[in-house]
Image (spheres, rainbow, N blue to C red):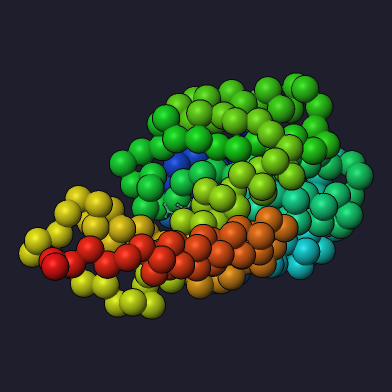
Amino acid sequence: MKIGIYGLGRFGSFWASTLSRVADVQAYSRSSSAPEGVLFVSEENVCKSDLLFLCNSISSVGEVCDRIAPFLKEGMIVADTCSVKVHPLETMKKRLPASVQILGTHPMFGPDSGRNGVAGLPVALCPERIDDGSLKTVLDLFTSLGLRIETLTAKDHDREAAYSQGITHFIGRTLDLLNLEPSRISTTGYEDLLDIVQQTCNDKWQLFVDLQKFNPYTEEMRKKLHSSIEEMLVKLDSIESIGEK
Ligand SMILES: O=C(O)C(=O)C[C@]1(C(=O)O)C=C[C@@H](O)C=C1
């Protein structure tokens, strides 16, 4: 099976290298060259893969679908890798030819969290328009990487991810505004917080904005977080001070 990667940004390059350990991988990107072990091919040729992973930003899925649609081969699988699922799957269904199969995937890791290997890490799967045999091929591929496969609907994915990945990136970016510094007397909890700031801010600003704007549940998450902070401030204010008499 020939695997194609469309887009070699931060995640695409990482995903191409990871997959090249267990499969034949070819890749196309507008700007960069392919990582070691991955064949760089033209935009038209990457569309002739058996399984094509789209590794572009959430906000560019529509544009990418329009670019690749004329070149896709009948029966192939097109899988997005976006951090939200409702938006890309709706877009792919609308803009890709009916003759290609569509699968939503969200590897719940990246170059930072997967730097020591991806075995044991989760990947979310949202089968959209795919036959059982093709789905099994993808399941076998992910299993060969040691991934933990979690199948769910796009809506359930986005709802759950808003309160896990979405909230993590929101807190990381918000704490970054405080310019927190390492401390000689830091606790492990504080070090974990600094790690969260670093890991979330290592990703592109575009990912943060797209995560917050294209997941239909993140607005509610931010509002609840905001009111929880206010509730806690009121709670503390209402406690009488217990200073020495
Ligand atoms: O490991 C990294 O580099 C990541 O930032 C991975 C990370 C995250 O931890 O939020 C970022 C985007 C993907 O959707 C999944 C996971």
Most extreme residue toward the right, as rendered?
Answer: 98
Q: Quadrant of the C terminus?
A: bottom left
Q: Quadrant of residue 206?
A: bottom right
Residue located at (59% from left, 23% from top): 140
Q: Quadrant of the N terminus?
A: top right
Image coordinates of residue 192 in percent, x first then y, are 28, 53
Residue located at (23% from left, 56% from top): 191
User: Is residue 69 rendered to the left or right of residue 213?
Assistant: right
Asked if residue 26 is positioned above or below residue 95 in the image, the reply reads above
Image coordinates of residue 190 in percent, x first then y, are 24, 57
Residue located at (78% from left, 41% from top): 102
| In front of the other: 233 or 210 | 233
Report the label total: 0
Q: Is residue 135 visible?
A: yes
| In front of the other: 115 or 222 | 222
Asked if residue 163 is positioned above or below residue 7 in the image, the reply reads above
Image coordinates of residue 172 in percent, x first then y, are 41, 64
User: Is residue 44 rendered to the left or right of residue 226?
Assistant: right
Q: Quadrant of residue 101?
A: top right
Q: Is residue 76 visible?
A: no
Q: Quadrant of residue 239?
A: bottom left
Most extreme residue toward the left, as rendered?
Answer: 184
Residue located at (13% from left, 66% from top): 244
